[in-house]
Amino acid sequence: MEVADVFRLLTGALSLLGAVLCVWVARVNFGRIPEDRKVSLGVATVSGVAFFKLLALAALFAVPATTLAVANYHTIEGVHGVDACNRCHVMTPMVTDMRDPESQSLAARHFKNGWIPKDQCFQCHSDYGLAGDLHAKMEGYRHLARYTSATYTEPIKFRGVFRNDNCLKCHEGTPKFTAVPSHSTVRGRLADSSLSCLNCHGRAHPTRDQRTPGHPDYPRLVGEKP
Amino acid sequence: MSAPIEPNPTPDAPPNKYRREFLWAMGGLSAAVAAAMAGWGGLELMVSPGTADEWHKSVCRFCGTGCTIRVGLRDGKVVDIRGHEAGHNKGVICVKGSMLRALPEIEGRLTRPMIRKGGKLVEAGWDEALDLIAARFKEIRDTHGPDALAFYGSGQLFTEESYTANKLFKGGLRTNNVDGNPRLCMASAAAGYVSVYGKDEPPGSYEDIDHAEVLFIFGANPYECHPPLWERIQRRRAADPRVYTICVDPRLSPTAKRCDLHLPVIPGTDLLLLNAMAQVIVEDGLAERAFVDRHVRFSQAGQTMDFEAFRAFLQDYAPSKVEGRLGIGADVIRHVAHRFARARASMSLWTMGVNQRTQGTALNIMLNAIHLLTGHIGRPGATPFSVTGQPNACGGVRDTGALAHALPGGRLVANAEHRREVEKLWGVPEGTISPKPGHHAVELFRAMEDGRVKGALVMCTNPAQSLPDCDRYAAAMEKCFTVVSEIVPDSETAKTASVLLPAALWCEKQGVLGQGERRYQLVDKLLDAPGEAKSDLWILAELATRLGLGDVIKARTPQEVWDEWRHISAQSYYNFEGMTYDRLRALPGLQWPCPTEVHPGTVRRYVEGDDPFVSKGAGIEFYGQKDKRAVIQLCPYVPSPEQPSADFPLYLTTGRVLEQWHTGTMTQRIAELSGAAGPARFVVSEVDASQRGVTSGDMIELSSRFGSVRGRAVTDPSMRPGLLFAAFYDARLLVNRVVADHFDPVSKEPEYKVTAVQFRKAGD
């Protein structure tokens, strides 16, 4: 079981607990709790009213807050994995291609050579720094909204600008990088991503044609059995 | 712990309590959904608009790879360039292509016509300039005959422009003095293909790289000169560990450094290598005799010979007999021959190292020959491929026949039947086309020098920098009434002009480019040209009118010219009648033959099922020859006229660098490219430098039998002693001043790659 699965189970259990507590507290008539009713909590004994107030606090605030924290940990960290992206079938061609040892796409070459050991999608698609991480989450949310509302068409199309920082954060300054004189003369254009690294270094993923239903490569890329 | 549960007494609750709670819950849910939707909507609005507002399919302006690109526009300017993933280049371009965005904005564009008055070029109007040109051309024609006029074009003009110029001069002005810079770069390839298959242009495609097991890179440097092809080769190597790359180059070029095997032949001797490989193939039983017997004919001086005669001819080229002159050991030659022949599929890729030679045609013939002998042709990955240097030398010049000896669709000036066909197709009276072939490039400039040619139109090229022995020919242009259509006023050629015409470039005009794999692609007009600059087609059409030849040049828009030429092509094996502008606009190009508007184009020529001209059941058929057999001419090795001597003991070879293209008229004006390449310099070996007291960075004076030039030298430990290299992009180091202008007797292509030179240290 992966860490993400533990968090998923924990989130489920906490949600259930919160719901049970809410129902329980909602059914209590505080005015009818006998004043002499004492409840032992092990370390202390409290009145029945105090107990249910504590229970209400837990049901309405503590448990939901904990659930949210645990669930968001999953949202923030658990979706870094390739499988998280692969859950949307429109992303499957990218993942299939990346894991295809025969493929020569940039993603596949980075994958099979172990240049990015884990969370390969996230590593190349989250811009540098905290803002980049946040941006990736926002994009992830947008993708989720698009996917669940089915407001997309295949083949999906990258919108916006792929930031060269995702390449430069590893490649810049390496001997191979500095050996090419034009890397320094186009440095400004690389930095603001107005000149894409992909121009010279090739395709990152299967082409749009390949990802279009009806293309001969489409069934293989979406994992359909021949 | 026991909890005192006291359920709420239901009877006390108001009857609508649960409805209210339900509404509250629904309200909360709606608010949550609304918040989520608002967040989504906000994020959609926050997505970056990208680098451009609109994207258009186009073609790279630079080399002959002919990459399909996407041009990004914003506010009417080119702001981004991306490789087109649907193109043959699969989205890959190079840094030059990436910087195309800066090309329309380069400083110093020529925006008004200029006429030389009192030794100086002064601005003029179009009418004045064109009237002057027409008057002078008429006067020259009437006084000295039509052959005193000439057109010198370019593999960078659009097809519609080269076609129109060819028609105007051959079918209108009645002179065959129509040549151009393709003579300097691929005439030998054309002559080789015509000699072997009867028709020009490669049989294979770039796609063959994806299937080849041996890649035989001969006299080519794709790492620098055709980077997207090199990237494709790299992908092929990574995909299959059996792939073996061989580079034949006297210099340890960036390509050679990265290949599995480098054969550093002595400059000018590589025909010995090909003949020796053929000898090994024949002697060691590596020839595909069944294929050869069915599809190949051997010939010498027009006489058909048999396989045994070919074998006998090759005996003088046994590896042990040539290794000393070639500089490659006999065992290595045998190894290469075996590797090439035994591979599942071998592909040769060659460019200027082969073409720009006094034996360029022979080298081309023999490169095709080793494929024919071993049957490495007509299968995926098996093909002899001449890579081209300019974006439209193939489509615009070779296919339209815009060369001194040629006519459209593979026809020849010297063939009376061909002349009659073309006169009919052009709608000009019989006898219009002169039976006398015109002057080829070098001869054309010699004719300007001695006054045989008195008026010339030079379009889209910079011969004063690109010709060998360039000072001599720049002076010749100054003696002549030279009209130059140019993008800048200060190119070496513009300086010689009598009249200078401002030309539109690239996507400031519309037309078709035809690159090395017979692929034609459309460039649409996206921008307005600066100032009064006009397309070369407009200039030609206006000139035709003023020359009284408007009835010859009736088609005046790119599409009209294209449709005329497209229909004419149907009367030849260069048939691309199915390539309408609409199809070319919709698709990332099509490869001819493409005879109908539903034909998908031809990836492999001469192959049944792919090439529409191959007879049913033939399998492979070289239909360009009368007997449908490819012809292997016996090609004896003839040493280059440029042999080292006591006075000139070293070899100079020239070429390109990654970030610059041709004479740098465009790329030198783009800071990202000129900054990366830096000023041109001589690359010399440490041995040669130290013998002359030269250290890296010193100024040297390089001299040959043709002249001398000063420039800075850099030493390179990988440079072999006895060899120097210089690129020709920098007008500040006009290396062509010293380059020999010997040319191939068949193709007439000059030998840029071999010049005997000497150098000495010069003061700063």
Image (tube, helix red, strand yellow):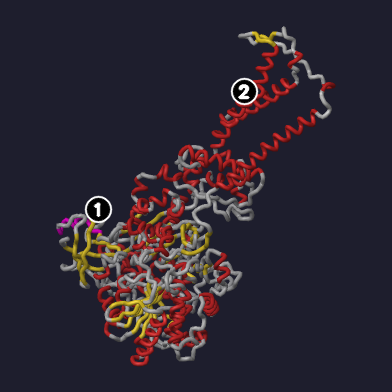
**What type is the residue that disc 1 sits on?**
Pro
Residue placed furthest toward the top = A36
Residue B260 at what x, y percent from top left? 37, 53
Q: Give the range drawn in magenta.
A: B683-692
Tell me, yes or no, if residue A220 can be seen here: yes
User: Which SS class for mark 2?
Assistant: helix
Task: Tell which subunit mark 1 falls on.
Answer: B
Q: Residue at x 28, y 86 (%)?
A: B451
Residue at numbered disc 1: B717
Eyeballing the image, is A161 above or below A59? below
Q: Where is residue B43 in the image (x, y as percent from the top left)?
A: 58, 44
**Could you tell me which residue is drawn at 24 percent across and 65 percent down?**
B651
According to the picture, the residue beneath numbered tag 2 turns out to be A62
- As for residue B256 lying within the magenta part, the answer is no
- Decide: few, some or many residues near mark 1? Use Cα within 10 Å; few <14, some 14-19, many ≥20: few
As displayed, is residue B745 above or below residue B211? Answer: below
Q: Find residue B237 and report its horizontal and vertical position in percent.
A: 44, 52
Nearer to us: label 1 or label 2: 2
Q: Cα distance, mark 1 to mark 2?
A: 72 Å
User: In the image shown, does B628 or B436 lie closer to the viewer?
Assistant: B436
Q: In this view, does A189 lie to the left or right of B558?
A: left
